[in-house]
Amino acid sequence: MDVMKLSPAELGVGSPIKLERCNSEYDVYWKTALEMLDLIKENDRKGKTTFMIVPYGPLGGYSVLVYLVNKYRISLKNCVFMNMDEYIGEDGKYIPKDDPLSFRGGMERIFYGLIDDELNVLPENRYFPDPDDPGVCLRLIEKYGVPDMTWGGIGINGHFAFNEPPEPDEECTNEEFLARTTRVLPITRETRTINAYMNCGANIDAIPKKCVTVGMKEIFSSERIRILMPRDWLAAMLRKVLHGEVTCRVPCSLFQTHKDCMIYASNDAIEGDVIPKIRVYNKK
């Protein structure tokens, strides 16, 4: 089956990954935030800590969370948030927190620093993968159990967190890829290019060449996995993940074998052109 020939109406039909259709990019963020808060409130009623693996971006989800938490006085004090990833500098350490590209600094600016103190995630419950201590997330799993939910955006090459697909000449089975834990690794040119486009006017030289990421092993253990696809440049990957071959060459396609994975996709991603078309400009 040529998944690129699937019509928007056919997307999700028969896929083991559920598709939640969203009218706009902002509906993607609202629906994700509401699911997160419903889960947190349910766990609070049970007296259970909510443990999530969370991204830095897409950023829109955090603005919704800040608004809802502060307005409706929803406490996050019984939450543990493990961020997915961070850029690494040439010295093998985190890039500085005050770097505009830093995910650690970004979380403070767009989320933790905007939540009312009496509602906020406790500072000791805010984690990032550590290049010097890659076992952090696995220890949290030992302490709290598997993550209640992992949510985040997807890369243009199908990565989740910074779990980049194997290089073309790299031998790797799906099972080996799913066993990869938190680690430092090079960022692919595709990822650096789209991140440069999204963050710094396509200045690829500004994007670090390495990162540290929570591994697929930790992520795949989650009770729920939620993938956000808010933009039109994700149209092809949406089709590959939902209906394509299950392969580590498209990392998120592996979630077809997960017990509870759902994609929140905007109409831009669902209806985006994936087959080249002839366009005529300045037609007389």
Image (cartoon, helix red, strand yellow):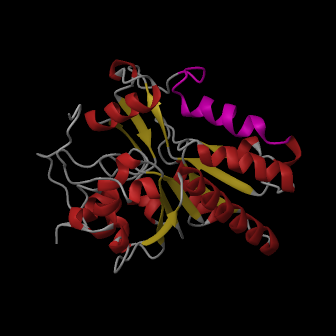
Position of the C terminus, as image quadrant, is: top left
Seen from the viewer's position, the closer of residues 29 and 162 is 29
Q: Nearer the viewer, residue 124 or 97?
A: 97
The relative height of residue 33 versus residue 46 in the rendered view (above or below) is above
Give the percent coordinates (x, y) of residue 207. 39, 25
Q: Residue furthest left?
A: 169
Instruction: Mark yes or no: residue 179 visible.
Output: no
Q: Residue furthest front?
A: 284
Q: On screen, 221 above or below 139?
A: below
Q: Is residue 214 left or right of residue 249?
A: right
User: Is 61 inside the magenta-drawn segment?
Assistant: no
In the image: residue 243, left or right of residue 218: left
103 drawn magenta: yes
Q: Quadrant of residue 97?
A: top right
Q: Position of residue 21 (x, y in %)?
A: 49, 66
Q: Which residue is depicted at the point 36% across and 20% down?
A: 203
Q: Is residue 102 above or below residue 205?
A: below
Outermost residue, bottom side: 14
For the record, the magenta segment spans: 96-116
Count of numbered labels shown in the rendering: 0
Q: Residue at x 79, y 67 (%)?
A: 44
